[in-house]
């Protein structure tokens, strides 16, 4: 599984740093929603779902956290600990965010508005969906 991390351009001067993100230029989709998590309690795991079509970029704008990405056959752990890096998460990827530092603010840029029907919240259902999609791909190749 390829991990796609964007290193955003920092506009720094003696006053400090600034990052500007524009859809299609810095972010590979139209940004339809922004949300952020903060004050995450010790030991909490968030996410624990995949999306059927949503794409996201995760940026830990303060503090740090870890993200587990799982494509159904491979798992990878990504560290988010700088405000100038963004982790791209495609659709059909199971994600879990954990080990949040007390000061962590995890910003999420999303390609669509909130739609509960786009969520896959059951891990076995996620694996079934990946299997189905792989079978469809194989059938199309015959
Ligand atoms: P939840 O899906 O549990 O967050 P995560 O999977 O990242 O841990 O979301 C927590 C609550 O916030 C839940 O009641 C749904 C609501 N919510 C929205 O209303 N809009 C949103 O864009 C998101 C991400 C969540």
Image: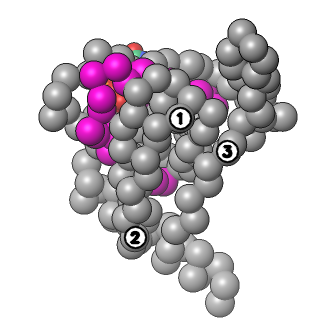
Q: Earlier in the sequence, mark 1 or mark 3?
A: 3
Nearest to the observer: residue 138 or residue 4: 4
Mark 2 or 3: the one toward you: 3
Mark 2 or 1: the one toward you: 1
Nearest to the observer: residue 122 or residue 11: 11
Q: Position of residue 35 (x, y in %)?
A: 49, 18
Numbered tag placed on residue 6 in the rendering = 3
Q: Secondary structure at mark 3?
A: strand
Numbered tag placed on residue 128 in the rendering = none
Q: Secondary structure at mark 1?
A: loop
Q: Is residue 115 visible?
A: no
**Residues at discs 1 and 3 in contact (Cβ within 8 Å):** no
Image vertical order of residue 14 relative to residue 10, above or below? above
Residue at x 27% of width, y 22% of height: 102
Is residue 97 highlighted in magenta? yes
Q: Which residue is mark 1?
A: 82
Residue bounds of the magenta highlight: 92-116
Q: Which quadrant contains ligand 1?
A: top left
Q: Position of residue 8 (x, y in %)?
A: 72, 36
Q: Which residue is mark 2?
A: 74
Image vertical order of residue 6 relative to residue 63, above or below? below
- What separation in Å lies between label 2 and label 3 (alpha carbons)? 21 Å
Rendered-image quadrant of the C terminus: bottom right
Mark 1 or 3: the one toward you: 1
Residue at x 46% of width, y 41% of height: 80
Q: Is residue 40 visible?
A: yes
User: Which quadrant of the figure has residue 26?
Assistant: top right
Is residue 22 highlighted in magenta? no
Q: Secondary structure at mark 2?
A: loop
């Amino acid at each position: 599984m390829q991990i796609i991390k964007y290193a955003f351009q920092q506009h720094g001067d003696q006053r400090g740093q600034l990052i500007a993100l524009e859809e299609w230029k810095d972010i590979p989709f139209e940004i339809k929603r922004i949300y952020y998590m903060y004050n995450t309690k010790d030991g909490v795991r968030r996410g624990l779902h995949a999306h059927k079509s949503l794409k996201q970029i995760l940026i830990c704008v303060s503090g740090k956290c870890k993200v587990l990405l799982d494509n159904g056959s491979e798992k990878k752990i990504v560290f988010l600990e700088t405000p100038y890096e963004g982790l791209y998460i495609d659709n059909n990827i199971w994600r879990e965010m954990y080990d949040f530092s007390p000061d962590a603010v995890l910003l999420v840029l999303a390609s669509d508005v909130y739609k509960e029907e786009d969520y896959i919240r059951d891990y076995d259902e996620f694996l079934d969906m990946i299997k189905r999609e792989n079978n469809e791909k194989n059938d199309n190749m015959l």
